[in-house]
Amino acid sequence: MKEYPMADNLNYLINILGKLKDLQRTGWLRKEIENPETVAAHSFGVALLALLFAPQYLNKEKCLKLALIHDLQEALVGDITPFDGVSKEEKALKEQQAIEKISQILGFEELKNLFAEYEENKTKEARFIKDMDRLDAVLEAKYYDNSHKTKEKIFNEFYNYANTHTNKDEKITKQLFDVLCKL
């Protein structure tokens, strides 16, 4: 077995990376943001938040891996949101099939395992990255409001959604949201 099996499929990897770098996030498009964040930019934001804020008791390497791959499947299925008319079950199936295909073609089984861990939301690391995923959207909304890229202010909408869907038991998450509410 080769140490880096995905090296044989660099063209596929080039396409996956390119799609993620080009794919604009649906929520920002709905808000009519000019030149909105891409999925790759969002994943970078989540990874940076994980690097900066992961508590010591979490496996930081696992957090970074989860942050980097949490939206990888969107390269094949797009950025599906609750407003797209796709059921949760159908979305989950499409995303699972996409991550299985990416993992198989790249010869990197760990991608499936990481994605399953993130989706199942059972580990402390997965729950933390879900929180950082939501936090990144709130920070991006604040950035858009501050840079006047929005027709109307959107920070409160994103903050309120994220604040009601985060893990309040995580001390750093609570602290970050406490600071955000004062912005």
Image: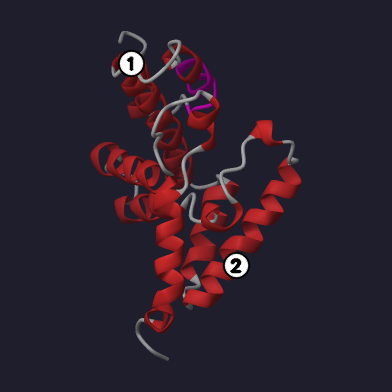
Residue at 39% x, 51% y: name it.
21
Instruction: Judge whether 86 appears above or below 75 on screen.
Output: above
Residue 66 appears in view: no
| Magenta run includes residue 104 | no
Q: Mark 2: few, some, or many residues within 10 Å (few <14, many ≥20)?
A: some
Q: Mark 1: few, some, or many residues within 10 Å (few <14, many ≥20)?
A: few
- Give the amino acid type for the residue marked by disc 1 in the picture: His
Instruction: Judge whether 171 appears above or below 60 on screen.
Output: above
Q: Nearer the viewer, residue 165 or 69?
A: 69
Q: Percent position (x, y) of residue 173?
A: 38, 27
Farthest residue to the bottom: give it. 1
Residue of label 2: 100
Q: Which residues are magenta?
A: 159-167
Distance between mark 1 and mark 2 Cα atoms: 40 Å
Residue of label 1: 148
Q: Percent position (x, y) of residue 123?
A: 49, 47
Residue at 35% x, 44% y: name it.
41
Q: Percent position (x, y) of residue 138?
A: 41, 24
Q: Nearer the viewer, residue 48 or 17?
A: 17
| Dot placed on the residue nearer the N-terminal end, 1 or 2 | 2
Does residue 146 appear to the left or right of 24 in the view shown? left
- Give the amino acid type for the residue marked by disc 2 in the picture: Glu
Residue at 30% x, 16% y: name it.
146
